[in-house]
Every structure is written in C-alpha cells, then in structure tokens.
Amino acid sequence: MTRGEHGISREDISDNALKVMYRLNGAGFESYLVGGCVRDILMGYEPKDFDVVTNATPEQIKGLFKNCRLIGRRFRLAHIVFGRDIIEVATFRGHHQETDEDDTVPKGKAIAKRDAHGQLVRDNVFGTIEEDAERRDFTFNAMYYNVADFTVKDFANGLNAIEKREVALIGDPETRYREDPVRMLRAVRFAVKLSMHIEKTTAAPIKQLANLLQNIPPARLFEETLKLFLSGKGEETFLMLREYGLIEPLFPQLAPFLKDENSREMQFVRRVLANTDERINSNQRVTPAFLYAALLWYPVEEHSQRLQSESGLNAHDAFNIASGDVIARQTQRIMIPKRFSTVIRDIWILQQRLPKRFGRRAFQLLTHPKFRAGYDFLLVRGQIEGGDLLELAQWWTHFQHAENGKQKAMLNALRRNEGGKGAPKKRKRRPVKRDSDA
C-alpha cells in the first residue's frame, strides 16, 4: 500500500523509532515498523510503543547503537534505550531448522528447538521479511511500514481482518498455540482491546489447549496478566477468559468458585475489576496487589475455615497459615513479586482487624499504611455480601471522615449498642491487703 492508500504519516511515529530506522537504513540494512504500532495507527489509536524489525543481526544492531542492550534467550532482541523510551528491534525471524534433544548445534548455525508439548524453547532463527511475516501470530500484526518509501506491506490480509473486526491467527491454530500458549491469552486481549471477535478456527482449539499455559514460566504469566487486567477493560477480559476456559490454568484455586454466574464470588471479582477499570480510565493509580488480593480472597477464606475445623487451630493462626498456603500455590502458576505479596497479606489481615474497633484500636487502624486499601476491599465485600459486613464498611466510611469529637461519640455509641461485646476486657484490680495495727 502506498502512502495515499494507508494514510500513515511520520507525525504518527515516535521520533526515537524514526531515528533507529534511519540509522539502520543509513548503514545499508532494511528496517520496518511492525505489528501493533502499525495496526493501531491504521485503526486510529495512538500506539503505546513502536517495534522495529530489520535484516541486521543483534550483534550488528549493537554495533550501531551505543545505547543498545541485547536481551532474551528464546529469541535475541535489541533494546535501544532513549531515557524512559525503549525501541525494541528484532531481526527477521526465519523458518525452523530443528534438532533433537541430544543433537549438537553446528557452529555458526541458528537452530530452533521445541519441548515435548511443541512449545518453542529456542528460536534464534533469522530469515527474510517474508518468512518473518509468516512467523507473526495474528494477521493484523503482519503489516510492515517502510520509512524509506512510506509503503505498508500487508502479508496476511491484516487490513481485511481489521475491516472484519476479527482476531485471526496466521497458520494452523493448534500448532501456533503449541509453539507459544500465551497466544491464547493474546487472542482474548486483542479481541477485547480492539472490540473484535476471535475468528472461528482461531477460537476452536483454545479450551482443549488451555492447560498448556501451565508450561509457561510464572514470571512471564505475571506480566501477561497485568496486560489482561490492567488495560481498562479488565472485567470484559475476565469474562472472555472464563468463556474460553483460561481462568483455571491461571488461577486454579479461584476457578471452582466461578461455576455459578450469580455467586457472590463471581460478583465480587467482577465488582473489583469494574472498579479497577474505572480508576484506570480516570487516570487514577491502581496496584496489582489489590487485584490479586480479590482474586484469591475466597480461596483464603475457605482454606482458613477448613483449617479451623480439621486441625482445631484458632481463627488467627488458621488465617495466617491459609494466607501463606494460597499465595505459595498461586506463585506456582503466576509469580507474584514480594513487593505485591506483602501488600496482599496486609489487605487480608486488615479484614480481620477492621471489625475490632474499641478503645484506641480504631484510631490505630486509621494510621496503618494500608488502611485505605483494606477499607476499599472491605467496602466491596460489604456491597456484595450485605448484612453486618456492609454495616461495618459504612461505619468505617463515616468514622474516617468524622472530626475527633464525633469519632469518640461513634465509639461510645458502638460500645453501648453492642453492650461491650468485642471490647477488650479490663483487668479487675485486686484490693491490696494491709496489715492492721496491733
């Protein structure tokens, strides 16, 4: 497509991406913008990042840019760093030339390797732009913008997919999913993000192959779930993941609670995701810790109750053990960095502490660093479950905004209404016996 046919202008492109392409071209290499940035510009969206492909090898790219670092094991990539802006540059990928597990790799020869499930574990195979296009995942991601002549090469009818509003894989879907199971998550993410549907043959194998996500490193799945749920369309994404059977391999402890569309657990997760979407779309801060605390709350609650009944543990000990167990099991599927797992536990512990409001406890809780997150969590629980939990959340809503005198009055009223129930008991002083004078 010529410039007049596609309408992409250099004004739509990052200055740093243009610098990278101009330097590659100036050194005698081919270079193109590719993938999501081209797709988004054609659809009228502003790209979040700009990816470049070239026929230069990673080492040749590094030789051209002092601000370059090479990353990746499965496939080597070059990151050109301009402060906070990073332009990712990849060498054209070629078709696989595979070896068995015990074969040695010929010197100077790039070889691909799959595991027993068909997943690519090594993929440093370089090729031509035509081969690279065939290796792309979805048809609308195989469009290449050439700054040298302002043309767009559309190898897989990506523009047609955009017009039909469909997410379609290039090649045999089962083979492509086995190569990289994360493509199933990407299919859902693109469908929601771009207001599209997943094309029939692309959708067909997903439920059957969903369990392959268990083979993906937990650290990679953490990054992928952030893209899924912190996109501003988290609730819609969650529902589509559930539709295609992709929640269970990601959150196996949560999945049993979601069988009933109208269950409190389902409604709770949806409400938290809807609130998160609203905050993101209003440019407010969100933390993955709050989201993960919500996704794992009912598994923690159930596990804690089971420990109490089966092991005779008190509520406090059972809850602490259950919290550790649930997080440990989850990190086997999706890594949760400690900076978030610590906050998750703080939010959960506050659910145990917020009902205890007598004396100085209420004022001490207000100064807790994670009080706001714990209160917000309690409020959503109250909105879903109602009853005493909603009353407790409403009490905290009024208490935290009240003046000091009003706060003391609320605590006195609480003590009167509950007859001292739950209040810390004061120790009675024993009278001191004194010897009487003779």
Image (tube, rainbow, N blue to C red):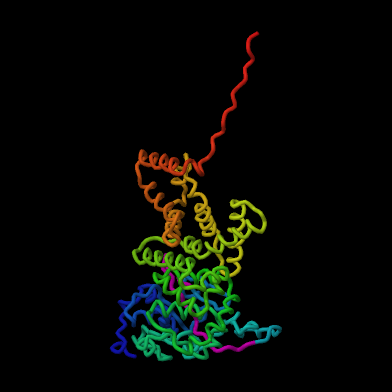
- Picture coordinates of residue 275, whole percent (x, y): 39, 64
The single residue placed furthest to the top in the displayed view is: 438
Q: Is residue 220 visible?
A: no
Q: Does residue 352 appear left or right of residue 6 in this picture?
A: right
- Picture coordinates of residue 423, whole percent (x, y): 50, 41
Q: Residue at x 61, y 68 (%)?
A: 332
Name the image quarter holding the C terminus.
top right
Q: Residue at x 63, y 12 (%)?
A: 436
Residue placed most toward the observer, 112 or 417: 417
The residue range painted magenta reads 79-98
Residue placed most toward the observer, 146 or 290: 290
The vertical placement of 307 against 47, above or below, is above
- The answer to whether residue 32 is magenta is no
The vertical placement of 414 against 308, above or below, is above
- Picture coordinates of residue 217, whole percent (x, y): 58, 72
Name which quarter of the figure residue 22 lies in.
Answer: bottom left
- Picture coordinates of residue 244, whole percent (x, y): 50, 80
Name which quarter of the figure residue 27 lies in.
Answer: bottom left
Residue placed most toward the observer, 304 or 211: 304
The single residue placed furthest to the left in the displayed view is: 4
The vertical placement of 15 against 413, above or below, is below
Name which quarter of the figure residue 28 lies in.
Answer: bottom left
- The answer to whether residue 92 is magenta is yes
Residue placed most toward the observer, 313 or 52: 313
Q: Does residue 257 appear left or right of residue 198 in this picture?
A: right
